[in-house]
Image: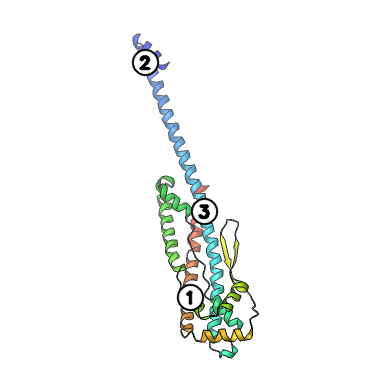
Amino acid sequence: MQLLRLSKHLKEQNWFAVFLELFIVFIAVFIGLQADNWNQDRVARETATTYYLRLIEDMRAEESSRLARITYYRQALEHGKRALLAMQQPNSDLGQQFLIDVYQSTQLWNYTPQRATYDELLSIGIANAIPDLEVRSLLANLYNGLDNSKAIQQEVTPLRNNLRSYMPFAVQNEIFKHCGDFVSFLENGIVVVSLPDNCELSLDPTLTSEAVTALRAYTDLERDLTRRLSELEGKLLNLNNYVRPTRDMVSRLAELAN
């Protein structure tokens, strides 16, 4: 219709009408392109907001996981300290609590950073999904730190394997059943592992004595336990170091999502 009118005006040499028709076409094209740009910007903002919210969920899960691990390793550390102190006593004074303490000091909770959304962003091209360069840089630095944290959290010193070689299996089994890890789940699906604050065994006195004697044959026990305590201190320091940066990143993303 527009072309027919334009052709008619050209034949009639009605230059004002020709100019008006061209102007209308130009305005229509401009508005169409602008509307398309506005729509693309809206979609980009909505996509970025969706990823901001998902990253917030991941980081809150990361914080929950770290706080639970801090509690867990503090318990293991306290067990280790009591066991190390008890080793200064004669064998006859060592009993079930010593066996519990030295065993619980070896407990380990595997760690993997909560980075599913970030990995997805990297796979699709993070610059397209998150246009803010500063935010992308902050995210990269944070997740690099969490990856480095994984190496520290996964460290296993000799005590864990060696102790399980010396301690009678019957004793290990009793501690595992009565004092072992308790697994639960948070609302966000994060697995939480905890140790009981108190636990009691009903070991035969002869078995207890045999277990203590067997551990005394572990000549490097004191050295390895000392090394384990140092390892636990390092794990706790590392876990604490990334709680605040994770919270700060959540606050920054929440501002952008609003």
Count of marks placed on residues: 3
Q: Nearer the viewer, mark 1 or mark 3?
A: 1
Location of mark 1 (residue): 161
Q: Position of residue 12 (x, y in %)?
A: 35, 8
Q: Is residue 138 left or right of residue 58?
A: left
Relative to 173, residue 111 above or below:
above
Q: Tell me whether the residue at label 1 lies in contact with that at label 3, contact meaning CB atoms closer than 8 angstroms.
A: no
Compare residues 243 and 223 and report the one nearer the observer.
Answer: 223
* Mark with earlier residue (1, 2): 2
Q: Please determine whether, in this image, residue 65 is positioned above or below residue 204.
A: above
Residue 75: percent from the left, percent from the top?
Answer: 57, 73
163 or 70, nearer to the observer: 163
First reached walking from the N terminus: tag 3 or tag 2: 2
Element under label 3? helix
Q: Is label 2 in a helix, a strand or a loop?
A: helix
- For residue 56, the mark is 3
Circle 2 residues within 10 Å: few <14, some 14–19, many ≥20: some
Q: Residue at x 57, y 66 (%)?
A: 193
Q: Amino acid at mark 3?
A: Ile
Mark 2: amino acid: Val
Spatial separation of the CA atoms under disc 1 and disc 2: 90 Å
- Position of the N terminus, as image quadrant, is top left
Q: Earlier in the sequence, mark 1 or mark 3?
A: 3
Q: Are marks 3 and 2 in contact (CB under 8 Å)?
A: no
Q: Please name whichever residue, 145 or 109, is drawn nearer the observer in this view of the structure.
A: 109
Most extreme residue toward the top is 12
Task: Residue 18: give its label.
Answer: 2
Coloured how?
rainbow
Q: Quadrant of residue 22?
A: top left
Tell me the kind of residue under disc 1: Asn
Q: Can you say whether 210 is above or below 25 in the image?
A: below
For the point 47% across and 56% down, which residue is it? 115
